[in-house]
């Protein structure tokens, strides 16, 4: 399971399907995606109400921490404009980020192991991949539909 790829999917979807300027639609779109994710995971993992109550707070906390790690990696200017020293610092920062992501991933899998039966936890990466794929298909289909010539 790749940490944070679901967050990446949400970011890509938001970037592709939302207007460039923030507005009320942004929050509504994110809420809609979040609702679809909850329904999809609940169905795919066959979560009981008790399991959902334990799973979602942990999963959302994990995703938020992964997003925070990724936010910290932006150099602030185009990569081509970085000096050798700045590139080395960014490289070192990336190595540290990889270690932090691995530790975070391990910690949250162990926490989720307490919330879900192992059979369901083992299915989580497949559910994440399937949801990402379906989300990207939906974005692609909407883009195609929006750019088709009107009759």
Image (cartoon, rainbow, N blue to C red):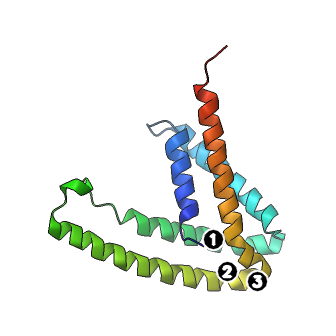
- Disc with the residue nearer the chain's start (3 vs 2): 2
Report helix, strand or loop for mark 1.
helix
Mark sitting on residue 118: 3
The residue lying furthest to the top in this view is 151
Q: Residue at x 35, y 73 (%)?
A: 94
Closest to the camera, between mark 3 and mark 2, is 3
Is 36 above or below relative to 138? below
Query: What residue did someone put label 1 on?
Result: 59
Residue 133 to residue 66: above or below: above
User: Dot 2: few (<14), some (14–19), or many (≥20) neighbours within 10 Å?
Assistant: many
Q: CA distance from mark 3 to mark 2?
A: 9 Å
- Secondary structure at badge 3 equals helix
Q: Earlier in the sequence, mark 2 or mark 1?
A: 1
Residue at the image point whose x is 39% and y is 75% from the top: 97
Q: Quarter of the image containing the N terminus?
A: bottom right
Q: Residue 151, position in %: x, y?
A: 67, 13
Q: How many marks?
A: 3
**What's the mark number on residue 112?**
2
Asked if the residue at tag 1 contacts the one at tag 2, i.e. Cβ–Cβ closer than 8 Å, the answer is: yes
Judge by depth and name the residue closer to the eye, 14 or 86: 86
State if disc 2 and disc 3 touch (CB < 8 Å): no
Q: Residues within 10 Å of mark 1 (few under 14, many from 20)?
A: some
Label 3, label 1: how far apart the Cα atoms are: 15 Å
Q: CA distance from mark 2 to mark 1?
A: 8 Å
Is any part of residue 117 visible from this angle? Answer: no
Rendered residue at 63%/74% (across/down):
58
């Amino acid at each position: 399971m790749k940490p944070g790829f679901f967050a990446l999917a949400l970011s890509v979807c938001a970037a592709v399907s939302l207007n460039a300027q923030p507005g009320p639609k942004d929050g509504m779109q994110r809420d809609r995606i979040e609702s679809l994710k909850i329904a999809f995971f609940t169905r795919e993992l066959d979560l009981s109400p008790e399991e959902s109550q334990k799973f979602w707070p942990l999963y959302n906390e994990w995703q938020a921490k992964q997003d925070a790690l990724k936010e910290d990696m932006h150099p602030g200017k185009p990569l081509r404009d970085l000096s050798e020293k700045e590139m080395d610092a960014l490289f070192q920062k990336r190595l540290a980020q990889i270690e932090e992501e691995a530790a975070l991933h391990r910690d949250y899998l162990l926490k989720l192991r307490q919330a879900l039966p192992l059979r369901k936890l083992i299915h989580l990466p497949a559910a994440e991949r399937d949801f990402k794929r379906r989300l990207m298909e939906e974005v692609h289909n909407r883009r195609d539909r929006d750019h088709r010539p009107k009759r």
